[in-house]
Image: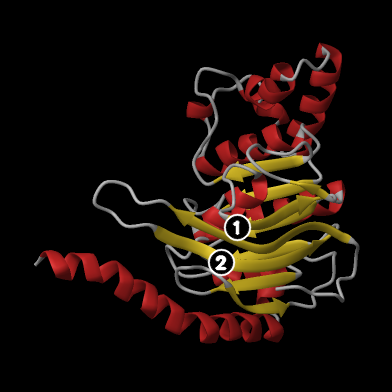
Amino acid sequence: MKNSSLPHEVHAQVAGVTRIYPATGHHPPVHALGPIDLELGKGEFFAVVGPSGCGKSTFLEVLAGLQKATAGLVTFEGKAVSGEVADGIGVVFQEDASFPWLTVADNAAFGLRRNGIAEAEVRRRVDDALAFMGLKDFARAYPSQLSGGMRQRVCIARTLVLQPRLILLDEPFGALDAQTRLLMGDEVLNLWRRTGATVLLITHALDEAAMLADRIGAMSARPGRFIDVVKTGWPRERDSTIVAETAFGEITARLWERLRGESLKALGHAAMPAMAAE
């Protein structure tokens, strides 16, 4: 969905983007996504919600350059994105992507060392990122010694040290309990404000989207497309206390009103193969 009234200059854009997975074996092609149009303002926090299987993660991977769009154009800072993650884009996934054989500090340093950054600069960035993420005292610990929330902080730190200008988060807190997710949300808001980066969050949690985002895109059942974009109106200096605001409940209610029917459609699509097999 295009929005010519963005508060900032356009930082990333998808225009007429679709993603169709080709037929394999006895399975027909799958039209997973689109067509989708979206403009992300520079420094904006945008969240995407939608029913299971609607193409949210596919959308993120196409925007990141991890998948190629079947049709349409993806641009970041005015340059086409296709086939590989563009310089300046950082991605954090739901799965714990830390390396168990590396310490917290070495996990955070991994991408920098792979890119040939001087060791003094590696240490400076890693020390700064670990301090910011509350991990300074765990620099020499291994992931197995950390809680799930702390391991996700390690993954965020590993992305943060690369100094991305566009941060893509694919349900990074999905495996955490509700209270921990709220606290991690506060940390992500601090990260967003500190870096000035544009952030796009994929989440299945309407409350998480309503708390974190400037705008929220609600996606239809597959093939995913935006059926509504909700402006939250929150101040930039916000935190998890806004869940007590009346407007917070109004935002989540609007999202659910738009998504309930789409979620029922998605359940029907998922049930059809099982019914056919009976």
- Report crowding for label 2: few under 14, some 14 to 19, many 20 or more residues within 10 A (C-alpha): many
Q: Residue furthest left?
A: 278
Q: CA distance from mark 2 to mark 1?
A: 9 Å
Q: Is residue 212 visible?
A: no
Seen in the picture, residue 178 relative to 106 is either above or below; the reply is below
Task: Say which quadrant the N terminus sits in.
Answer: bottom right
Looking at the image, residue 171 lies above or below residue 207: above
Q: Residue furthest top?
A: 119
In contact (CB < 8 Å): disc 2 and disc 1: yes
Q: Earlier in the sequence, mark 2 or mark 1?
A: 2
Point 50% across, 52% down: residue: 176
**Where does the image place residue 30, in percent across and percent down from the top left?**
40, 59
Assess disc 1: are there few (<14), some (14-19) or many (≥20) residues with their C-alpha within 10 Å of its C-alpha.
some
Whether residue 119 is situated above or below residue 151 in the rendered picture: above
Q: Position of residue 182 (x, y in %)?
A: 62, 60
- Which residue is under mark 2? 34
Q: Amino acid at mark 2?
A: Gly
- In the picture, measured across the screen, residue 201 lies left or right of residue 163, that is left
At a point 84% along the width and 23% down the height, the residue shown is 124
Q: Residue at x 66, y 22 (%)?
A: 110
x, y (%) of residue 70? 56, 54
Q: Nearer the viewer, residue 141 or 264?
A: 264
85 relative position to 19: left or right: right
Q: Is residue 170 left or right of residue 41?
A: left
Q: Amino acid at mark 1?
A: Ala
Name the secondary structure under disc 2.
Answer: strand
Where residue 266 sits in the image (x, y, percent)? 38, 72
Along the line of sight, the residue nearer the viewer: 239 or 170: 170
Image quarter of residue 82: top right
Q: How many marks?
A: 2
Badge 1 is on which residue?
71
Front label number (2 vs 1): 1
